[in-house]
Image (spheres, grey):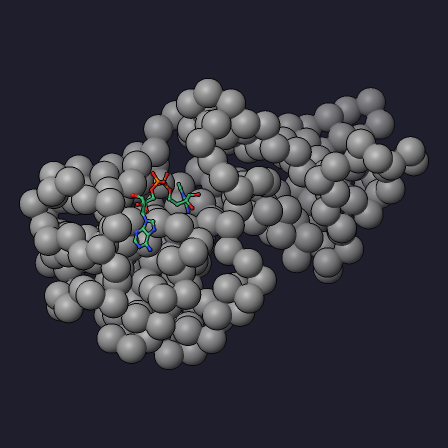
Amino acid sequence: MVRIIMHGCNGKMGQVITGLADRDGDVEIVAGVDPMDSGMNTYPVFPSIDLCDVDADVIIDFASAKAVDALLDYSVRRQIPVVLCTTGLSEEQLAHVKRASASVAVLKSANMSLGINVISKLLKEAARTLADAGFDIEIVEKHHNQKVDAPSGTALALADAINEEMGGRYEYVYDRSGVREKRSSGQIGIQAVRGGSIVGEHEVIFAGTDEVIEIKHTAYSKAIFAKGALQAAKYLAGKPAGWYEMKDVIG
Ligand SMILES: NC(=O)c1ccc[n+]([C@@H]2O[C@H](COP(=O)([O-])OP(=O)(O)OC[C@H]3O[C@@H](n4cnc5c(N)ncnc54)[C@H](O)[C@@H]3O)[C@@H](O)[C@H]2O)c1
């Protein structure tokens, strides 16, 4: 049985995971952490991570970027691996994640779904052929009107997957409104649409002369992220210190 601390347990993702974990005989949420609590969970809930003294095998985090530094310090101090799913981390926080992963197992993914992680592989393959054939690459992502970060962590991760594959040749462009010049081939344009209750759409467009290829993923429910997070938690429990990604879980 994998014992989990659910960081951000009363948020939308925390509650989807709580529901799935209830029906999963291989995991148990032994504690939650959330400053907002109305006592609806069957496990104890602490208002901050530093107050949580429950023994656990792994932490799942879907909370707030503001809470990530304290979480990483806790995870290192108590030697509990962490599945880090919160998005919108700063450069300094990403460096903190890297440092923490030298002392404890950290799995970080901007998107825990199987589909996005498969798409990421497909994009690398597509870019290898299409980029040098003169195709321009653009990403359009759509999310609900409650999302605070833009563009999404997933859109950036997809752009990074392409860019790393192509030797870091691209700059990312988020806004062309003030620029009166043609697009250069060294750009990946990333556009964010926000509205209603859209769970998450990511479309990567390879636009060539007379042909366009679009690779698109649509999330219809948050359950896809929750399933991936639980799968990652089972994988990470007991793992040695290091930086892990969803591709390690999926194989
Ligand atoms: N990686 C992925 O696949 C993936 C998927 C969905 C959402 N996310 C990200 O996960 C995060 C949470 O998403 P959500 O939709 O559940 O948001 P949400 O706002 O519904 O929930 C966040 C919860 O975290 C709690 N919280 C705030 N500060 C905290 C702290 N210091 N310690 C512990 N808990 C704290 C809030 O009270 C809230 O209950 C966001 O950054 C979102 O972008 C990632």
Vertically, is 67 above or below 72? above
Question: Residue shown at 9%/50% (left/top)?
Answer: 43
Vertically, is 192 above or below 241? above
Residue 216 visible, this angle: no
Question: Residue shown at 53%/42% (left/top)?
Answer: 149
Name the foreground residue: 28 vs 95. 95
Could you tell me which quadrant the N terminus lies in?
A: bottom left
Could you tell me which quadrant the C terminus lies in?
A: bottom left
Indicate left or right for 76 with 24 as reference.
right
Vertically, is 232 above or below 179? below
Residue 186 visible, this angle: yes
Quadrant of the image occupied by residue 52 = bottom left
Q: Position of residue 218 (x, y in %)?
A: 47, 28
Quadrant of the image occupied by residue 249 = bottom left
Query: Which corner quadrant of the figure contains ligand 1?
Result: top left
Question: Residue shown at 11%/39% (left/top)?
Answer: 40
Indicate left or right for 46 with 103 as reference.
left
Question: Residue shown at 73%/60% (left/top)?
Answer: 167
Q: How many marks?
A: 0
Indicate left or right for 171 with 116 as reference.
right
Vertically, is 52 above or below 208? below
Q: Position of residue 100 (x, y in %)?
A: 41, 73
Q: Position of residue 204 (x, y in %)?
A: 63, 34
Q: Position of residue 116 (x, y in %)?
A: 48, 40
